[in-house]
Image (cartoon, grey):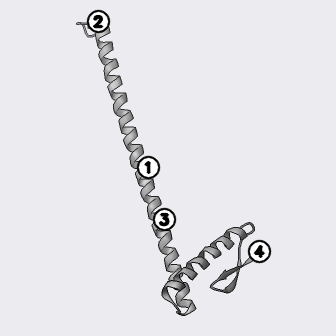
Amino acid sequence: MPEVSIQINERLYPVACEEGEQDHLIRLGRYVDKRVKELSKSVGKIGEAHLLAMACLLVADELSEANDRARMSKDDASAALVERSSETLDRAAISVERMTDKLEKALPISDNGD
């Protein structure tokens, strides 16, 4: 199993991963390191565990917001699809009514139930 070293807040962390996931894991590590450095600048000197916990909460919040946006986007897309489908069905119903009217006018009306 491959292992990569992730640097976060000036410390190296060896992390095992599946074959082919190394580059992705390195990118994730860089992102977390960036967020930790940004957070460190804004809160000043605090313990490393506290800093990493706060960074994890920030990243979790970003993920939560992204999931909410994706869910709303999916709901919006579903609503738009339902609306378009309803409009299509309305147009089809109007066409069927027109065709029925034309057929009724074109066919002779029989008094004997035929």
Query: Disc 2 marks which residue?
Result: 108
The amino acid beneath tag 3 is Ala
- Tell me the number on the disc at residue 2: 4
Q: What is the CA distance from the residue labelled 1 to the residue labelled 2?
A: 48 Å
Residue 18 left/right relative to 33: right
Say if residue 114 shows up in the picture: no
**Disc on the earlier residue, 3 or 4:** 4
Q: Position of residue 63 (x, y in %)?
A: 50, 69
Image quadrant occupied by the N terminus: bottom right
Secondary structure under the numbered disc 2 in the rendered image: loop
Q: Callout 4: 10 Å neighbours few (<14), some, many (20+)?
A: few
Q: Position of residue 70 (x, y in %)?
A: 47, 59
**Disc on the earlier residue, 4 or 2:** 4
The amino acid beneath tag 2 is Pro
Query: Disc 1 marks which residue?
Result: 77
Q: Residue at x 73, y 77 (%)?
A: 4
- Tell me the number on the disc at residue 66: 3
Q: Residue at x 57, y 82 (%)?
A: 37
The amino acid beneath tag 1 is Ala
**Disc on the earlier residue, 3 or 1:** 3
Q: Residue furthest left?
A: 111
Q: Quadrant of residue 100?
A: top left
Q: What is the CA distance from the residue labelled 3 to the residue labelled 1?
A: 16 Å
Vertical side of 40 occupied by 111: above or below: above
